[in-house]
Amino acid sequence: MNNASGYGELLFLALMGFLLIKGLRKFLGLPHRLPRWNKPLGYIWVPALALLAGTALLKVKLPLLADGYWLFVLLTVAAVLVLVRDYRPARTLLLALTPFLLTKIIEYALSGSDGRVLKEYDTLVDTTQGFSIIWLITFVLIARSQKITLEKERLLREEEERAKHLIEAQNAELERLVVERTAALTHQTAELRAALAELRAAQVQLVQAEKMASLGELTAGIAHEIQNPLNFVNNFADVSLEMLVELREEQARQQREPKLEAELLNDIAQNLQKIHHHGQRAASIVKGMLEHSRASTGERLPTNVNHLAEEYLRLAYQGLRAKDKSFNATLTTEFESTLPEVEAIGSDLGRVLLNLFSNAFYAVRQRQLKGEPGYIPTVTVITRQVQDQVEIRVYDNGMGIPEAMRQKIFQPFFTTKPSGEGTGLGLSLSYDIVTQGHGGTLTVNSQDGKYTEFLISLPINQAG
């Protein structure tokens, strides 16, 4: 090999060494893992240029210098891999490089002055080198796969950390809002404090009732129902306090205006009537929920089906709205005004209605999420008397139920919802309550992708 070709080979190896180190720095993240080594490694090509400049002074042929430089590059790479061996892909690369590096050391030791391996060792070196190259490629691919896996794990950890910080920030904000609200409540009148104490007691009852699976869906709806009359009570109380201050200021003047005082007194009286009205509404909601939360005694009592259906329909809708503010649906009721009362266990029948309403809202919401043009989510409840039976129809224009699933719909633990969103017990328990507990029937009619209708039929069993 002449010097000209030797120069070319050395320059090529210098370029290869530079590219190899550049790729290694990026693959292993050396700016972060070895900040002190990172910059000097960028000058891996300098020794090659120094060898080129010094060939005239050294009595060593260029082939040996080129092989020696390449061996230097490989040893440098091995040293870097040893320093970052705590990183799993680096350990794999070190395992990949070791046989190849040993082969190069042996090849260099067995090379003659012209840079070629002695003839008697040529076959052995070629075989060993071929094996080491296959080994090297295999483990480089494994290291690449490990890096991809570690990168995914790192991104997942970062995402979990961000989620954790977001939850902590939300919790802190919620705590701040609770503190502010608590401070505001301390300034209300004695009457309002008594009402709030009663509501807190009701909330404790509701928390206990939430542990019952059949009442779990009611919690958010109840909160929304109670919030409306509470807002009216608070607003009218604040306005009344402002009017009392204005009335006292008017009475303290030397020239009083009886007409203005009478108007203020009249407005205060109207506000107190409104406070009383909405307070009674809140108390009615609390009383009704406490009755529904009590354990069933098994005693059948005359029950107004229209009232029960309307109450649970509103609570089920508000419960879903509390979870998803963007959800809206059209609620349609067709109640027969002359519908007779049914002898039933009110709390049990309420659980059945709640389950059917919740399923209906879930079905229309799922169809709405598909983005079907012109689709309007609608849930309809119809009551009517058919001979000696009272029928309750719950209709929704949601996803529908396929024929194969309708055959199993009332079986325990069977559910059409995705895993984690349903236990498969709601309709099974509802079927038992209606058929075994009340001697009625519960059937379903549906068309896949169009609608679902549940029909409850209960005997009236009127006394007398």
Image (cartoon, rainbow, N blue to C red):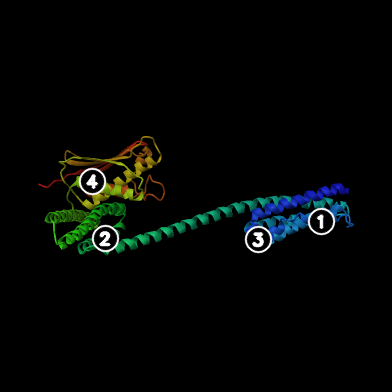
Which label is found at residue 50?
1
The quarter holding residue 89 reads bottom right
Q: Residue at x 22, y 63 (%)?
A: 189
Mark 1–mark 2 Cα distance, whole angstroms, equals: 86 Å
Given residues 165 and 186, the one toward you in this image is 186
Mark 3–mark 1 Cα distance, whole angstroms, equals: 25 Å
Which label is found at residue 205?
2
Q: Is residue 385 above or below residue 135?
A: above
Q: Amino acid at mark 2?
A: Gln
Left or right relative to 137: residue 179? left
Which label is found at residue 310?
4
Q: Are marks 2 and 3 in contact (CB under 8 Å)?
A: no
Dot 3 or dot 1: first in sequence order is 3
Dot 1 or dot 2: first in sequence order is 1
Farthest-out residue, top: 374
Q: Position of residue 256 (x, y in %)?
A: 13, 59
Q: Is residue 408 visible?
A: no
Does dot 2 land on a helix, a strand or a loop? helix
Does dot 4 land on a helix, a strand or a loop? helix
Q: Amino acid at mark 3?
A: Pro
Which label is found at residue 35?
3
Q: Are marks 1 and 2 in contact (CB under 8 Å)?
A: no
Given residues 146 and 444, the one toward you in this image is 146
Q: Residue at x 26, y 60 (%)?
A: 205
Q: Position of residue 378 (x, y in %)?
A: 30, 39
Q: Is residue 136 visible?
A: yes
Q: Say which of marks 4 and 1 sits in front.
A: 1
Q: Amino acid at mark 4?
A: Glu
Q: Are marks 3 and 1 in contact (CB under 8 Å)?
A: no
Mark 2–mark 4 Cα distance, whole angstroms, equals: 22 Å
Does dot 3 land on a helix, a strand or a loop? helix
Dot 2 or dot 4: first in sequence order is 2
